[in-house]
Image: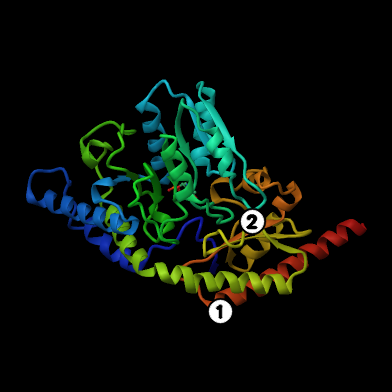
Amino acid sequence: MIYLDNNATTAIDPQVLDAMLPYLKEQYGNPSSAYSFGKKVARAIDHSREQVAALLHCEPVEIVFTSCGTESDNSAIQSALLIDRDRKHVVTSKVEHSAIMKQAETLARRGYEITWLDVDENGLPDLSALEQAIRPDTAVVSLMWANNETGILFPIQEIAAICQRKQTIFHTDAVQAVGKIPIDLRSGAIQFLSLSGHKLHAPKGVGVLYVNRRTRFNPFLIGGSQEGKRRGGTENTASIIGLGKAAELAVEHLSEETTRVKNLRDCFEDEVLSRISGVQINGDREHRLPNTASIAIEGADSEALLMLLDQKGVCCSAGSACTAGSLEPSHVLRAMGFSTERARASLRFSFGRFNTEEEVSAAVGILVAAVEKVRTANRGVLAA
Ligand code: PLP
């Protein structure tokens, strides 16, 4: 198998698994218990908090462990809406992940007004449109740091500065950014940030919501006093320990992401562009994650390509894994102004720490053959 779908999920790093195992076996104490068997686990969770804080350049107390990126996204928005109930306006973009989009659609049905920011053909928002969109009754602005389909990076620091000037709460879905690019929250301009363990070689089912220590927070899951009374529910101890270790490894691997992994992606794109006619890169080539290639292959249906690639053991995707199976073309590519045809002819390859040059060149060869096959079949259909 050649796994080139690291934006969908990543393999658990063996060091992460090793860190987790004691908490699935002998260290099963409840971190809230009063005796030392439990307190030892609570200390291990606090160590994880420090490891994640080091990756984000924030304070450990600003880290709230959750069950996934989706929970973090929902918690941030719901908390922001409760701060001032008279504010009934939310600003987001047309290219967000469903964890934000569907939530905003639900809010619209409940009487909130949503401003959906457009993006240009590079996948970038117009910052003056953002500035104009923010009103005195805006409860929260939620914009993603890195797009899961195209890898396009929004200028988050500039966006945060605009929200700060306008005194509006800013949340960023950084699920795809954390571990792939440097994140530094020291300026304090971002109030909420979401991340998810399984995108950075930790297990699925654990995430983090960063809550700026000066920001009022209302818990989404109401129950026990866990996470400093910010998230009820007995902690998913082993996964939290795993996420801490994964964050520590991400700090160590960050320069590799921006060099070796980027080189793999760039070599892949260069090879594909030179060996297959009618290929275009979707979005801005500068402002994007180092690991993501979103390509449109003229005259090739992505579903057919995915099947052929799967038969040869290559894992990649057409759009995001969360919307897979839907017949709709990618909302991200459509928002960038691309035709339905181009959106349906697009594939996402996302590289990671465990990929090799050999895998990349083998994958290119398999893709070249698959495109040829699909195009020949299309010509046959047209001729018939
Ligand atoms: N936000 C983005 C940008 C994502 O890519 C994903 C997952 O693909 C999520 C949120 C949801 O994360 P999780 O799967 O942990 O709920």
Instruction: Identify which amino acid the numbered label 2 is placed on.
Output: Gly
In the displayed structure, 181 sits above or below 60; it is: below
Question: Mark 2 highlights which residue?
Answer: 283
Whether residue 93 appears in this view of the structure is no
Instruction: Identify which amino acid the numbered label 1 is placed on.
Output: Glu
- Give percent across and percent down for residue 228: 21, 40
What's the residue at 57%, 50% (across, down)? 320
- Give percent across and percent down for residue 181: 44, 61
Viewer-closest of 9 and 192? 192
Considering the numbered disc 1 on the image, is that residue within a helix, a strand or a loop?
A: helix
Question: Mark 1 highlights which residue?
Answer: 358
Label whose residue precedes the other's in the sequence (1 or 2): 2
What's the residue at 24%, 56% (across, down)? 50
Tell me the quarter of the picture where residue 296 sits: bottom right
Of labels 1 and 2, the one closer to you: 2
Whether residue 98 appears in this view of the structure is yes
